[in-house]
Each structure stands twice: as structure tokens, then as C-alpha cells.
Amino acid sequence: MTSSATAFPSKPHTTVVLRSAILSRLILLALTLIWRTLLSPYDTSAPLNPTCLTHHHHRQDPNAPVLFPSLASAIENGVVWDSVYFVRNAQCGYEYEQSYAFLPLLPLAISFISRTVFAPLVPFIGYRAVLGLSGYVINNIAFVFAAIYFYKLSVIILKNPEAALRASILFCFNPASIFYSSIYSESLYALLSVGGLYHLVTGGNSVAVLWFALSGCARSNGVLNAGYFCFQTLHRAYDAVFIEKRAYLAIQVLIAGALRCICIFTPFIAFQAYGYYNICLGRSSDQMRPWCKARVPLLYNYIQSHYWGVGFLRYFQLKQLPNFLLASPILSLALCSIVYYAKSRPEIFFSLGLRASTEEKNSSAVLFSLELGPRSNIARIPEESSSKKQEYHNLRQRKHMIRGDPVVLPSENDSIVKLGYLSVSVLPFILHLGFMAATAFFVMHVQVATRILSSSPPLYWFASHLMVYRKKWAYLICAYSAAYILLGSLLFSNFYPFT
């Protein structure tokens, strides 16, 4: 980056991120069209569309003629894998037990757009193609906004616009990119979770609760975003008890934190209750599904276990070795990012940030302190100052490299580190990543780790950090993303298994 670009980086950097996000979606679209043209799909069932079990108004007869059947067929051929469930739920509602594994936010959005904005297209390409088109448009637009929020969040946390820009571009070309441009819930989840985090770190707790709650309507792991409020509540309660010496204030903090977490869990729980109402109520004991009789009748867990075999260590089979290999790059990057942080800042990591210095806590007041300044002050980043520091630091690094000296990572006391990946502000994100990575490895179908972890900010922050201090790793990370983008667009678009 040039010095002119880093003096006031926010606006031009945001433009770069916007262009990168759009360019990445166009590249994915082009690759998908190329692979579908050159290859035949492994499974040709994508265009099949049985009649809905119940009557839904505004639904066109699937056998009705359309004006552009070739275009309709091209769109419907992209409805593969989980996309089938999302489109079917949008078209017919939740017909089968296993369909409740796919949460309602994306189907509702698809149904709304297809019946409003894109309704005039139904006579031209048919209703199911309109549903598919709606899903593509929603997810690609959501991804672009997610990338913008990702950059804004990264600037605030890293306090280094250059590092934030690198991380954001990596996010735009992440290895799970094909899912962010398909009819999957990844884009909506990324937008709502990253957007919620941005509002959280800028002092908008109420808005963050709303965004996190909606993320739980997109993906089940959205409820884990409540962990950020648990982290915030822990530190504020600790300050209230041990610094302020005010037990009553600690109780207030705990109650507020608990209410926020409940609000985040409520939409997911409400959807489980909806499933219970549709499947269990009004049936005799011998007609009830097994999960209906459980003490805590949780439909989602039953579906994952019964239909997909998800469970602790249940995927540890020799025949699944290729899937473990497929997920190994993202899991290795996650493990390295966590271990690197823990080894570099052990007193911060193992004390959950409670032993962080006052200076560092003040730099992350929203997450760590009881007293908050004006929201505008919290969100303001000393971009020019940090840019000058980074420019000086990069110049020093280049001089070492030219002389052939070894590049030494900055020490813990270096201000660049405190404003970068090793900042105490990154800790809650590291803890969230650690929990998600462990769950993906030990509980889930491990190959989904690539897309489940792809919206986790510290992966890209760590990769951005490596790109400065370990040039070989920079090439490796870029090659990994490019290879998975090519492989994903090839396999996924032609109905072959991929993560």
C-alpha cells in the first residue's frame, strides 16, 4: 500500500473492499457457468419439483409453460444439495420432519422477494426459478454488505486499517466462497453475525442483540453469538465486584447480560416450539415421533442425529478420512491462530482477559469496562496515527529484509502488537473460534468446517498477520483460497460432494 492510500484509509479502503466483494461474486458466477457448461452434473435431480403437499396460494403450477424455459432450467439446475431444502421450504413451507433442520430466515426472505420484487418474472421463467433467482440475489447482496461490515469491525478491533483491508480481501475470496454465492444460509449468517459484532463493539448493545437473534434464525450456531455478551457480562461483573466494590451493580450487570442472551436464544427456541406444534400436538402416544416424548423435546438435535448421524465422535471412521483431509486446512489455520495467540499472550488468554492492563481494557471499553464513553468516541479509530506507525514498521521490516536480517516478530510490549492481532480485543473472537472449531472437529460432519468457520473474523486477522511477517505463508494462504474456490465451484455446481 502506498503512503497516500494509508493517510486517510477508511473511505478508499471501504471502496476497495466493496469492489473486491463484487468482483469475487462475479468470478464465482463466471466459474459456475463455465463448469456447468463443460461438465455434466453427477446428480440430475435438481430440476425435479413435486407438487406441494398442501395448497399454497401464489404458487404456479410446476407444469405451466414459461416463455424462457432454457433460462428457467439454467437457474433450477443450480438448486442443489441444501439449496433444495431452502427453496422447497420457501415454496411449500415445512412439509417434512427433516426440513426443520433448515432454519426459516432464508426461506422467508426468498418467499417474500419472489412474491414481491421478482413476482413479474414468474410468467417468463416459472415460480421455482424465481425462487432460485431470489435466493441467489439475496445471498450475493448479503455477502457484499457482510464484507463491508467485516472491514469496519476489523478496523475497530485491530486499529490498523492496512491489516483490516488485507483481512477483508481474504474474506471476500475465502475458501468457502461458493456457498456465499449459492442458496445457502452462509451469507445471511455472516452479515448478521459480523454486523452484530460491529454494533456490539461500537456500543449498540440493543441493535447487536437484534442482529444476533436474527443470525440464530439463519443458522443454529447463531445462538453462540450470545457468548460475546457472556464475555462482556463477565468482565463488567468482575469490575463491579472487585474494582467498584458494588455488589448491587454486579447483580444489575448479570441480569442485563442474562436478558440479552435470552433474547438471542428466543427465535431459535420459538422455531423448535413451532416444529413441536406441527409434528407432535394432536397425535396419540403411539403416533408421536420419539423426540416428542423427550423431557426436553428439541427437534433440531433429533434431526441432526437421526437423519445425518451428527454426534460426538460419530464421524471418526476410517472411511471419512478424505473428509478430514478436506477440512484439515481450515482446522489447521484455526488451531494455529488460537495457539499463536495463547503462546504470545498467555496471561491474557488463560485469565480470559481479566489480567489485561488498564490501558488495553480502555482501548476496548465496550467489551471490558463498566463505564462507556459516547458511542462516537468508541467507534472513532486513530487511523492516521496507526497508519503512520504501520508505515514506519513496514519500512523497518523492508530494511531488515534487504540486508538479509531475519524478520523478528514484535514483542508483547510493541505498540503494533497491542493494536493488532494480539490485542486483548481479539480474545472473545478467539474463544468463539475455538469452541466452533472443536465442535466442527468432534461433533459435526467434519467437512462442513470449511464453511462453518469461514465467517469467523480471527481466521482472516491471523492470516493478515502472517502475510506481513511470514511471506511464504501468504502465498500458501492465497493458494489455498484459490484452490478451494476453483474446486468448490467445479464440484458443488455439478452436484458433486464438497464440504
Image: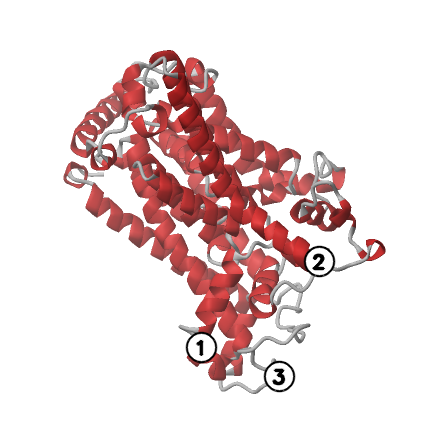
Position in image of residue 224 (x %, y %): 52, 38
Real-space CA distance between mark 2 and mark 3, rounded to the nearest whole angstrom: 30 Å
Going by the numbered disc 1, the residue's amino acid type is Ala
Mark 3 highlights which residue?
Answer: 63
Q: Secondary structure at mark 2?
A: helix
Residue 53 in view (yes/no): yes
Going by the numbered disc 2, the residue's amino acid type is Ile
Q: Residue at x 53, y 77 (%)?
A: 127
Q: Are marks 2 and 3 in contact (CB under 8 Å)?
A: no
Mark 1 highlights which residue?
Answer: 119
Q: Residue 389's image quarter? A: top left
As drawn, 184 above or below 336 = below
Q: Residue at x 38, y 59 (%)?
A: 141
Real-space CA distance between mark 1 and mark 3, rounded to the nearest whole angstrom: 18 Å
Q: Secondary structure at mark 1?
A: helix
Q: Secondary structure at mark 3?
A: loop
Mark 2 highlights which residue?
Answer: 279
